[in-house]
Amino acid sequence: MSDIDVAALAQRVRRLEAERAIAETMYAYGRGLDYGQRDVFLNCFTTDADYQVDMRFGGESTLSFHGHAELAEYYEGHTHAPDAWHKHVTTNPSISVDGDKATTVSYFLRVDASAEEAGPAYVLASGRYLDEFVLGDDDVWRIRSRRCEVENL
């Protein structure tokens, strides 16, 4: 291999590693929220992150949170196992990395099951996430901005 080929290969590997780390952060969001792992959930976001939820049913409605303090309040107000059994499923991520920044578009489903009785799980909500990520000084990719578009509830 020539030096140019090695440099190109190294750049491709860095991009693939970044994409994998970003996807892991996307998946950690659901695990942290579903299983009551507050630190895991908050570590998905920069300390100054913006999170906006747009409800697209029954008219336009928006919730927004800024920074770890408000995200922690959102987290505390959300249900977690074993009080509620649900899974935030993130799928079909499209990730574009540009240096130490990235944008993503992905779909999500929230699958719920009753905590009190047996029965089939059901999709409570679906939609998509529009994210902006940044690479931190600690080499961890975190969400700087998330727009959650709830398209079905």
Image (cartoon, rainbow, N blue to C red):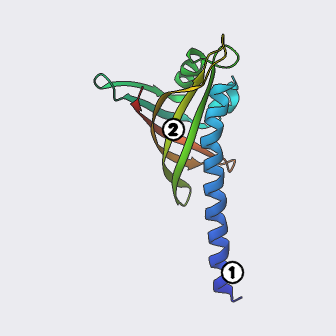
Which residue occupies 66% across, 76% down? 9
- Specify the quadrant that holds the N terminus: bottom right
Return the residue found at the far top: 116
Pick whichever, 91 or 31, lies toward us: 91
Which residue occupies 66% across, 30% down? 32
Left or right for 83, reference 130: right
Query: At which x and y percent is residue 50?
Result: 47, 34
From the image, state whether disc 1 or disc 2 is nearer to you: 2
Query: At which x and y percent is residue 16?
Result: 63, 62
Residue 17 at least partly seen: yes
Q: Secondary structure at mark 1?
A: helix
Dot 1 corresponds to which residue? 6
Return the residue found at the far bottom: 2
Q: In the rendering, which numbered label is found on residue 108? A: 2
Which residue occupies 65% across, 78% down? 7
Pick whichever, 142 or 111, lies toward us: 111
Q: Are marks 1 and 2 in contact (CB under 8 Å)?
A: no
Query: At which x and y percent is residue 146?
Result: 47, 38
Q: Of the residues shown, which amino acid type is indicated by label 2?
A: Phe
Query: At which x and y percent is residue 48?
Result: 52, 34
Using the image, determine if residue 144 lies above or below residue 35.
Answer: below
Q: Residues within 10 Å of mark 2 (few under 14, many from 20)?
A: many
Q: In the rendering, which numbered label is found on residue 152? A: none
Using the image, determine if residue 117 lies above or below residue 93.
Answer: above
First of labels 1, 2 by sequence position: 1
